[in-house]
Amino acid sequence: MDNTSILVLGAGELGMTVLRNLAQHPSRSSVETITVLLKPSTIESKDRAKIRDIAELRLLGVEIIPGDLSASVAELSGIFNRFHTVISCTGFVTGRGLQIKLVEAILTARVKRYFPWQFGVDYDVIGRGSAQDLFDEQLDVRDRLRSQHKTEWVIISTGMFTSFLFEPSFGVVDLANSTVHALGSWKNAVTVTTPEDIGKLTAEICYYQPRIMNSVVYTGGDTITYGQLADIIATISDNKVHRVEWSLRKLKADLVQDPDDVIKKYRVVFAEGNGVSWDIEKTFNAQQELETSDVIHWVNNHLITKSTLVK
């Protein structure tokens, strides 16, 4: 019997929802194992949230193996070569160089199928040399995968996490001051998807037949302009919403003053508006008629009470 085991790297916000959906997917065979790679310190942690997550994973039948992504390519490939499919849910927080190291370990291990950490914007459209220099590494990963033919790859473009639109540090929605900032223009759009939906869609794409391979798959919960976002916030706010446009020139000047600020790098990329949004009707979820949460749904569930739902 062919090895159909799946390894997920990481069990953070996205990794947990990917693992839940893989473990419970109706197309999963009875002999197929779902495994997660976690740091030994995470497995043995006394933190209540981590203890709860570990217990949930065990209840789902997910196998847990210890490992550290700071290990060498050779060490990582020795772990990866036991698995048919590897799905990376590492995020950017692990630092520069990790994504390239992972793809090299994947190819060295001759893993049959790889889902790299590309859950975000369309790096091909953005291109090299953007304000967010980490994106160049994402393009390096794509180039490396496209240059070979032994490992199938699937890239899932999801846009921004929906919650990040409302992250105070990002500065687009400032609920405390009833203010919405447009990045570049009120007509600029951004595609967003919740982690829960990304987990569900990743499992659907993973198990889809005929098998998806060597492709960029677009998903999305919503594509919304900053003007539309301001309208939604105005609907739920008791106060007048202040609309402030942050021009691309201003955001670039802010970055010049603070060139290492990660958030300011992101603001410039989204203000430029290239590769950060796409038509929802063309997404995998729309074509497969899979329900996802749009921004209004997210707002209704996270920002306001049931008695003041946005219509």
Image (cartoon, helix red, strand yellow):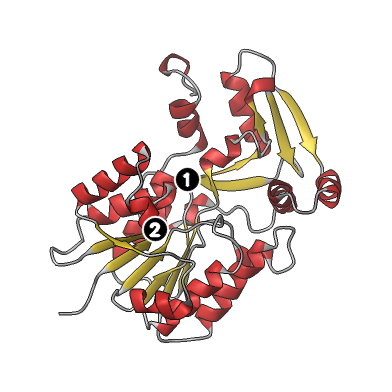
Q: Position of residue 218 (x, y in %)?
A: 49, 59
- Residue drawn at (44%, 86%), measured in percent from left and top? 149
**Residue under circle 1?**
221
> 11 and 120: which one is in front?
11
User: Residue 76 sits in which quadrant?
Assistant: bottom left
Mark closer to the chain start, 2 or 1: 2
- Residue drawn at (54%, 67%), measured in percent from left and top? 98
Left or right of 258? Residue 117 is left
Left or right of 297? Residue 259 is right
Q: Secondary structure at mark 1?
A: loop
**Which disc is residue 146 wearing?**
none
Q: Position of residue 308 (x, y in %)?
A: 48, 16
Q: Amino acid type of disc 2? A: Lys
User: Residue 36 sits in which quadrant?
Assistant: bottom left
- Residue drawn at (49%, 63%), measured in percent from left and top? 117
**Residue under circle 2?**
39
User: Residue 1 sits in which quadrant?
Assistant: bottom left
Q: Residues within 10 Å of mark 1 (few under 14, many from 20)?
A: many
- Residue drawn at (70%, 58%), measured in percent from left and top? 132
